[in-house]
Image (cartoon, rainbow, N blue to C red):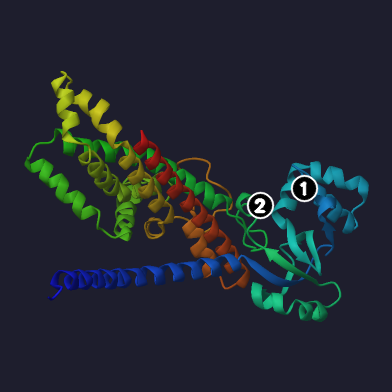
Amino acid sequence: MLDVGGRQARRRRRTVRTVEAAVAMPVLLALLLLGALLFDVITDTLSWQVLAPAGSGRSFAFAEGFAPFGSWDRVMRLELAARGVPAEDIEPLLADPEERRVLEARNRVELMPWVDGRPFRWLVTTVSDELVADRPLWSGLASRRELLAAAEPGQVVVLNAWLDPAFVLRNASRSPLVAGLLPAFVGSLLLVGLVILLAVPIGVGTAVYLEEYASDTRLARLIELNLSNLAGVPSVVYGILGLTVFVRLMRLGPVVLAGALTLTLLVVPVVVVAAREAIRSVPPSLRQAAYGLGATRSQVVLRVVLPNAVAGITTGVVLAIARTIGETAPLLVLGAAAFVPRPPDGLLSTFTAIPIQIYSWVSENDVEFTHAASAAIVVLLAVLAVLYGIAYYLRRRFASR
């Protein structure tokens, strides 16, 4: 007797396994490529360099320069003494605000992983240092002995770690050795903060209106049609809109407020779609039970619908905000500056953002700026990872409630 049912079941299982393999292979390939790209970016934040220092060229042991809240001052005292500055002149030099500002702008104090064959040494590099050679991490690791042997007297061979806490805290500079990410980092935080304040009330309010209040009118259909169309518009079009309306017609100029308004237009459709889906997921029985107890429509929305939809709304908002951090095209069209020496001090200040700073550094014809750009990419990815982690945590927390 033929086992027709068993044969069909085995055929179905083979088909399912084939489809699963066909789906898993592109995903696995994408993950491998993404991992390789991330590995390349991270390793590019480390480079072997041969420097002809304009300063003393001396390095200092970790214990000599480390202080819980004053390593820069301690190492600079050692460096100034090594440069021949008299001991009685060092303290007044560091105490003078203008002299200190000049020193901070022209000198970079860093704990290098490797200096002239010795690990973890403090080294002061300056904007006047001459770069003799720059090698990638792995090729330099294989040839570090040759680099030491070929270095001339007075030259220093270092393993330079471009990504360190000071990198995020330094101002921008035309010199890659002392360039930092602080203006771009602060600019991105200001943009994100303003977008949250503007996009969340507008997006969630629109979603509540469309799902809970609006009837099938021409206005409601027009709003839904526009939202569907706006969600698929390329981001550069929003940049053109922001340039026309906020920069030129409203005469704001390429400032933080204009950038935030432009990004708000970009993410509001995303927030509306996410909020509507979350509101739709609330069971109708909860609404009917609330109405049966005598609650008004506003009470049902505020006390029943939104508390049960907050998990989906929060996730959508966080993911939409994460998108704004990585946007470059609308801000470039808007006229955001590629170089801002200091962080913006208000909503009407010129600004830059992390993606624009990365684009600017990559465009420079200098290998050292590519290392700085790789360090900035790692910072950007870390910020995105934190936001996605927050979205996952909030969704789990509200879902459990």
Q: Quadrant of the C terminus?
A: top left
How far apart, in angstroms, are the residues tagged by discs 1 and 2?
Answer: 11 Å
Q: Give 135 or 249, whichever is nearer the viewer.
A: 135
| Up/down of 133 relative to 384, above or below | below
Tell me, for residue 71, which label it has, or none.
1
Categorize mark 1 by other alpha carbons within 10 Å: few (<14), some (14-19), many (20+).
some
Picture coordinates of residue 384 (x, y %)?
A: 46, 52
Residue 300's spot in the image, x, y percent?
Answer: 21, 26
Along the viewing direction, whichever of 190 and 216 lies nearer the viewer = 216
Judged left or right of residue 355, residue 233 is left
Q: Are marks 1 and 2 in contact (CB under 8 Å)?
A: no
Estimate the x, y position of residue 325 in percent, counting from the top left. 43, 52
Residue 351 in sight here: no
- Could you tell whether 96 is left or right of 44 in the image? right
Q: Nearer the viewer, residue 216 or 360?
A: 216
Q: Amino acid at mark 1?
A: Ser
Report x, y in % for residue 80.
85, 54
On screen, residue 275 above or below 51: above
Name the residue located 75 percent from the left edge and 76 percent from the top edge: 144
Element under label 2? helix
Give the quadrant of the N terminus.
bottom left
Q: Earlier in the sequence, mark 1 or mark 2?
A: 1
The residue that mark 2 highlights is 166
Q: Amino acid at mark 2?
A: Ala
Choose top left, top right, bottom left or bottom right for residue 306: top left
Residue depicted at x 43% and y 56%: 326
Q: Residue at x 31, y 57 (%)?
A: 240
What is the tally of numbered marks visible in this picture? 2
